[in-house]
Amino acid sequence: MQLILITAVLGGALALALGGSLNALAATKFRALWLLFLALGIQLIFIFGRSSFLAGAGVWVFSAAQVALAAFLIANHSLPGMKVAALGFLLNATVIAANGAMPVSARAELTVHDELPPAEGAGYKHERLDDDTVLPWLGDVIALRGVETVVSAGDVLIAAGIGLLVYGRTRTDEARGKHSAK
């Protein structure tokens, strides 16, 4: 999550430095925005603990959130960076489907944390990467010391896509000759 925020801020800052405007970014019309909010809402349930109403249906509810997010990305594929973000999502979905959860490298975790946190911390989303992991290079294996987190190649592409979206939409006004940062 921190990586997405960082790339979005950097994309916007670069576009503004090059004469862009926040007006076009603010005016961006997303299709099926409700799908994004649905997916994020479900994600929050898994981040802050499984609710009792999910008993037995948690995997299906989590899968529904992923389908909602995929549908949102497809609906907005024409916006800058959304195809890159969709590719990142596809990589993450592939490794999760192959393993039943996102594999997390203990070595990468120890690079950014003093001790090894539990891999199962976010519901159905994470498991420890081991010799039985399928497609281990697509798991959370990239340690980011500055933000003290471990991410996957898919996460990097999602963040890059969001950064490109913010940059591209912020630069849109410049192409029309509008250079204010209002």
Image (cartoon, helix red, strand yellow):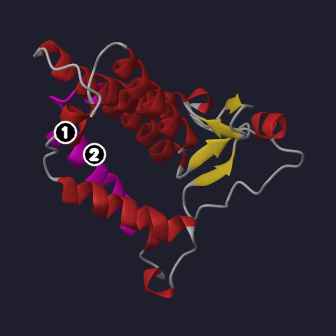
Compute the Cα span from label 2 to label 1.
Answer: 6 Å
> Which residue was labeled with disc 1?
74
Residue at horizontal 45%, vertical 46%?
A: 97
Q: Is residue 113 above or below residue 111?
A: below
62 is within the stretch colored magenta? yes
Horizontal and vertical percent position of residue 83: 27, 27
Q: Range of the magenta residues? A: 61-83
Which amino acid is tagged 1?
Answer: Ile
Nearest the viewer among 107 and 173 is 173
Q: Residue furthest left?
A: 176
Majority SS type along the magenta span: helix
Q: Is residue 50 above or below residue 143?
A: below
Q: Label 2: state its secondary structure.
A: helix
Q: Residues within 10 Å of mark 2 (few under 14, many from 20)?
A: some
> Which residue was labeled with disc 2?
70
The label on residue 29 is: none
Residue at horizontal 47%, vertical 66%?
A: 44
Horizontal and vertical percent position of residue 22: 27, 33
Residue at horizontal 28%, vertical 20%?
A: 20
Horizontal and vertical percent position of residue 182: 27, 34
